[in-house]
Image: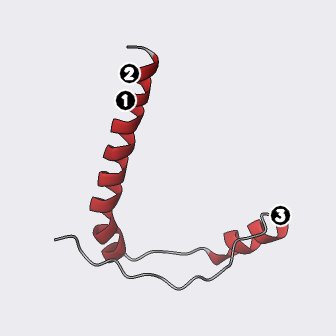
Amino acid sequence: MKPAIPVMKTQVELTDFSEANRAVIQKLKIKLPASYIDQVEPVIDDQLTKAGVRLANLLNSIWP
């Protein structure tokens, strides 16, 4: 069973990628708690594995 990952409330709606919005985002300096990192680490590992397999299949189809 995968751990439940709480959804954090959006602090900034990122629809405009202007310099002003980048500055706002950088000022947030969001720090995630260690418990959140522990919860998402298995998901990140799983997604990276899937991406690696997809990339390997793509490269094998290009250069058999």
The C terminus, quarter of image: top left
Placement of 7 over or under 56, stated as above or below:
below
Answer with left or right where residue 24 lies relative to residue 48. right
The amino acid pointed to by label 1 is: Ala
Residue that appears at 31% across and 53% down? 45
**What residue is pinned by disc 3?**
19
Give the distance between the C-alpha atoms of the residues marked 3 and 1, in whole angstroms.
37 Å
Q: Nearer the viewer, residue 41 or 64?
A: 64
Task: Calculate the distance from the C-alpha at mark 2 to the C-alpha at mark 1.
Answer: 6 Å
Q: Residue at x 37, y 82 (%)?
A: 6
Which of the labelled discs sits on residue 60, or is there none?
2
Where residue 50 appears, as percent x and y from the top left, is: 33, 45
Return the disc, 2 or 3, that comes first in the chain's sequence.
3
Instruction: Using the numbered discs, state the Cα–Cα distance from disc 2 to disc 3 in whole angstroms.
Output: 40 Å
Q: Which mark is residue 56?
A: 1
Cβ atoms under marks 3 and 1 closer than 8 Å: no
Q: Name the N-terminal-most of marks 3 and 1.
A: 3
Q: Are marks 2 and 1 in contact (CB under 8 Å)?
A: yes
* Local secondary structure at mark 1: helix
Name the kind of residue labelled 2 in the image.
Asn
Q: Residue at x 41, y 22 (%)?
A: 61
Q: Is residue 26 left or right of residue 45?
A: right
